[in-house]
Structures are given as structure tokens and as C-alpha cells.
Amino acid sequence: MKAPWSWRGAAAASLIVAALGLGACSKSSRQATEVGSTAPSTTTESVRVTSVELGRAVGADKRVTDPTRSFAPNDVIYATVNTDGSAPSTELKAHWTYQDGQVVHEETQTIAASGPASTEFHVSKPDGWPAGTYRLEVFVNGASAGTQEFSVK
């Protein structure tokens, strides 16, 4: 009578199990490399927005010196985006919209962060802003980091 498992069958089964194990290991290693090497998610995690300030003026340190959320039609509207963290290259974007969602202005700045920092954005309209509600949305490497609403009266 033949044994249910021969040495050839056991060897073949061992090779199959080993091949499957290697395939699973290489797949998980590949996934870890792909996820870990994605620049936006790595950078987004290391630099974060701590606050956004709106106002009529900024100082030499790029921080708002005259804070407000209510502007006159001819005001220049300044925003200071305060960040913390470090990364060799982080993209900050200011997306300004009018009450109906109409894009007023969009600007992107790339910073090399190494601790707390302030980045200044601003918008102006020489012929005057229409009265209404506006919104500033700030993005870090394409991910929304918060919004600020303000008005023009």
C-alpha cells in the first residue's frame, strides 16, 4: 500500500507553500515601498497648518498685523498661513472664492519647512470687491487644511 504522502508530494507541497509565502512577502514589501515613497502623503503628515489669520496688513514676519474678517471693497485682503513641522518641499495653496463658489484667485507657494513658519498670501481688486461672503480654503500638498470665511461690506 502506498503512503498517503510521498516525499515527492511533501516536497512539492513545501515548494508551493514557500512560493506563496515569498509572493506574499514581496507584495507586502512592494506595497510598503509604494505607500512610503508617495511624496504628498509623507510631506502632508510632517507639515501641518496650525492657524490661518486674515487681515488688512502684514508685517515683515509675514504675520497679519491688522486682523479682521470684515473688509471694505478696496481693501487688500491678507492671509497668513502658520505651519509647523519639517519637510524639504511642501506645497501650500490658497483658494479664494466668492459666495456662489466663483473662484476669485488661487495661488500656490512651495516652502521648505523646518519648524514653525508663516507664509503670506493676498488678493486685491483695484475696481473694488463686490459686497458679500467670501471663503479662503488652504491646502497642504493638495489636501484641504481648513477654511476661513470673511465678508466685504
Image (spheres, grey):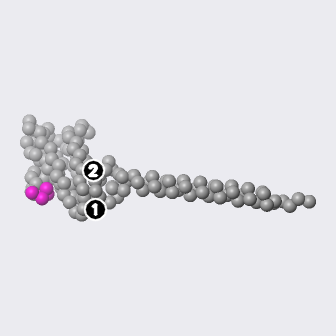
Which mark, by number, is residue 91?
Answer: 2
Specify the label residue 55 is tagged with. none
Res. 103 image quadrant: top left
Element on which disc 2 rests: strand
Foreground pick, 65 / 33: 33
* In the displayed structure image, the side of residue 54 where residue 43 appears, left or right: right
Residue 8: percent from left, percent from top: 78, 57
Query: Which comes sooner in the sequence, label 2 or label 1?
Result: 1
Q: Nearer the viewer, residue 37 or 133?
A: 37
Q: CA distance from mark 2 to mark 1?
A: 13 Å
Q: Amino acid at mark 1?
A: Gly
* Membership of 53 in magenta stretch: no
Q: Quadrant of the N terminus?
A: bottom right
Foreground pick, 97 / 28: 28
Q: Determine crowd level at label 2: few under 14, some 14-19, many 20+ residues with C-alpha closer than 10 A.
A: some
Residue 11 appears at what percent x and percent y? 74, 59
Q: Point out the image quarter for the C terminus.
A: top left
Residue displayed at 18% across by 57% down: 118
Q: Quadrant of residue 7?
A: bottom right
The reply to whether residue 6 is in sight is: yes
The residue located at (56%, 58%) in the rendering is 25
> The magenta stretch spans which residues?
60-64
Residue 10 horizontal/vertical position (percent): 76, 60
Residue at 54% x, 53% y is 27
Question: Looking at the image, how many numbered discs can be counted on the residues?
Answer: 2
Q: What secondary structure is found at the residue carrying circle 1? A: strand
Q: Which residue is mark 1?
A: 85
Q: Is residue 148 left or right of residue 73?
A: right
Give the residue drawn at x 9%, y 42%: 73
Q: Residues within 10 Å of mark 1 (few under 14, many from 20)?
A: some
Residue 57 in percent (x, y) is at 9, 52
Residue in front for this viewpoint, 6 or 59: 6
